[in-house]
Amino acid sequence: MCYTLRSVRGRKCRLRAEQCSQVPLRQAGKKWAASSAGRAPRSQRGGREFEPPAVHQLQRRTRRQAAAAFVISDVPTAPTLTLLRVPDVSVAVCRLVSSHPVSPWMTTGLVWSITRTADELSVICDIAQVPHEVRQEGPFAVFQVQGPLDFALTGIVSQLSAPLAEREIPIFVVSTFDTDYVLVREPLIAAAVAAWTDAGLKVG
């Protein structure tokens, strides 16, 4: 008398009744799978080749774990950021209509930036040179993130903004090819430096 068991591949294997007379059928199947691990294929023992289900399950787990380890190790680690205040710089952020021409006052000072879009002309420049009729915000101090920063890094801006957001300190961030610049309203400089320092960032 034989019992028929079906493997994960749909193949059938037979277990003699005397082998499982003392245990339930399910336990007998587990016993058969454990005893078959490491044995030569059935093709070498005069039967059809069959690998035990337990071996397949172990291989699948190993592949999933290896894939997860690869993904984790492939993510670049963001460095501990260092911010340096640009000395003797006080800037304004200005808005003009998109069609406004670039004027000489926009390109004065140590730090300036001009961005034109379909909606506006945005200018960052020395606040002392901005005409009174121009819409502007400021004055801002400028902090440079020590770089250069790799383009593959993630979470840089969140490291800069999260400690300040917790203390309700607004900032304006400008990115260049090499690094980021953070503009902080001058009355809030001390509070921003304290928030960054408490978060583990270096400020010089």
Image: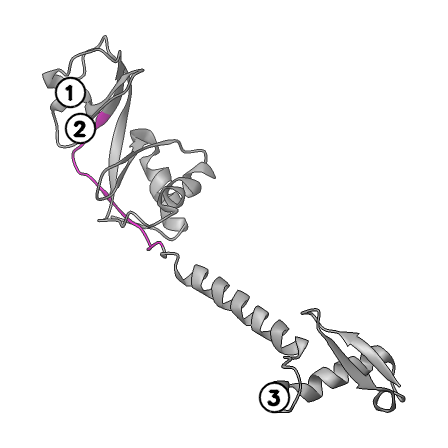
Q: How is the image coloured?
A: one colour
Front residue of this view, candidates 122 and 24: 24
Q: Secondary structure at mark 3?
A: loop
Residue on which disc 1 sits: 106
Can residue 158 be found in the magenta stretch? no
Q: Earlier in the sequence, mark 3 or mark 1?
A: 3
Front residue of this view, candidates 185 and 94: 94
The correct choice, above or below, for 30 with respect to 82 in the image is: below
Spatial CA span between label 1 and label 2: 7 Å
Which residue occupies 43% across, 64% down?
A: 70
Residue on which disc 3 sits: 38
Residue on which disc 2 sits: 112
Location of residue 21 in the rendering, given as x and y in whole percent from the top left corner: 89, 88
Q: Nearer the viewer, mark 3 or mark 2?
A: 3
Spatial CA span between label 3 and label 2: 71 Å
Q: Is residue 96 left or right of residue 62?
A: left
* Label 1: few (<14), some (14–19) or many (≥20) C-alpha neighbours in 10 Å: many
Location of residue 137 in the rendering, given as x and y in whole percent from the top left corner: 30, 20
The correct choice, above or below, for 184 with respect to 204 in the image is: above
Query: Which residue ends up furthest to the top in the rendered image?
Result: 133
Please state the extent of the stretch shown in magenta in the rendering: 78-91
Can residue 83 be found in the magenta stretch? yes
Which residue occupies 49% across, 68% down?
A: 66
Determine contact: label 1, label 2, CB under 8 Å.
yes
- Quarter-wise, where is residue 38 in the image? bottom right
Which residue occupies 39% across, 59% down?
A: 74
- Quarter-wise, where is residue 30 in the image? bottom right
Q: Earlier in the sequence, mark 1 or mark 2?
A: 1
The correct choice, above or below, for 204 with respect to 7 in the image is: above
Q: Nearer the viewer, mark 3 or mark 1?
A: 3
- Quarter-wise, where is residue 2 in the image? bottom right
Q: Amino acid at mark 1?
A: Met
